[in-house]
Image (cartoon, rainbow, N blue to C red):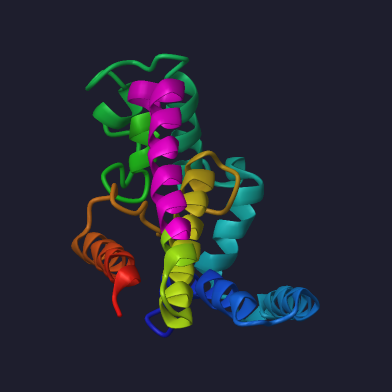
Amino acid sequence: ALEPDLGTAVCLVPLFLVVAFLAGLRMRAVLALAAVMLLTAALAWPFLKDYQKTRIYTFLDPSLDPRGAGYQKIQSQIAVGSGGLMGRGFLGGSQAQLGYLPARHTDFIFSVLAEAADFVGVVVALGLYLLVLWRMLETARLARDRLGAFLVAGLAGSFAFQVVYNVGMVAGLVPVKGLPLPLMSYGGSSVLSSLMGVGLVLSVRMRRFAN
């Protein structure tokens, strides 16, 4: 948050909410907390930096700055929409291969997949992410103690948030933010943290029969 890297900091919010709910926090309290967070976000508008406000403006209407702040969203939507049902094939997409799509190896890697393999590839990729998430939740259910269950469920919440936000971002459904797609985006720190999380989940699963 101080860097500033608000996107990464926000990933801790779903982790907290999932663990708090499992620990016994009432749904009424969760909803009240969410309402307070939304109100705080609204009151924080005057304190946002100019580039943060611009991201929100261009999310609502990317045509306000089609060659600047709105460029990423426009090119990403073109890439996602141009693949068709079966995609344009490996190295066949114009947006990614001709350099129109920025950050195509990191934040917008899913746009490259959508353009190359489109609906079929997207369904397969999301199915694999759903499989990983399901296995995480199953591991949380089988955990031998509350600590293991809370740990895995929190990691699952953070993992799911990153996947949903990144996919929504490339589709133009949420504001553009530098949030990588777990286990797919290029980037050492992202891959390392994702694999560490998977390692913790596997550790809890492995020890479910321990005395």
Judge left or right: residue 28 versus residue 94. right
Residue 159 in the image: above or below residue 184: below
Q: Nearer the viewer, residue 140 or 82?
A: 140
Instruction: Give the number of callouts.
Output: 0
Where is residue 193 drawn, in percent x and y?
27, 67
Q: Residue furthest front?
A: 211
Residue 42 in the image: above or below residue 139: below
Where is residue 170 drawn, in percent x and y?
47, 42
User: Is residue 130 one of those drawn in magenta?
Assistant: yes
Q: Residue furthest bottom?
A: 2
User: In which quadrant is the C terminus drawn?
Assistant: bottom left
Q: Nearer the viewer, residue 194 or 106?
A: 194
Residue 6 visible to the viewer: no
Q: Which residues are magenta?
A: 114-138
User: Is residue 196 one of those drawn in magenta?
Assistant: no
- Dominant SS in magenta: helix
Residue 48 visible to the viewer: yes
At a point 38% along the width and 17% down the height, the residue shown is: 87
User: In which quadrant is the N terminus drawn?
Assistant: bottom left
At a point 46% along the width and 50% down the height, the residue shown is: 134
At a point 32% along the width and 22% down the height, the residue shown is: 94
Where is residue 197 drawn, in percent x and y?
31, 67
Q: Nearer the viewer, residue 177 or 148?
A: 148
At a point 60% along the width and 45% down the height, the residue shown is: 173
Where is residue 31 drawn, in percent x and y?
77, 73
- Which image quarter: residue 145? bottom left
Q: Nearer the viewer, residue 97 or 135?
A: 135
Judge left or right: residue 191 versus residue 133. left
- Which image quarter: residue 56? bottom right
- Which image quarter: residue 168? top right
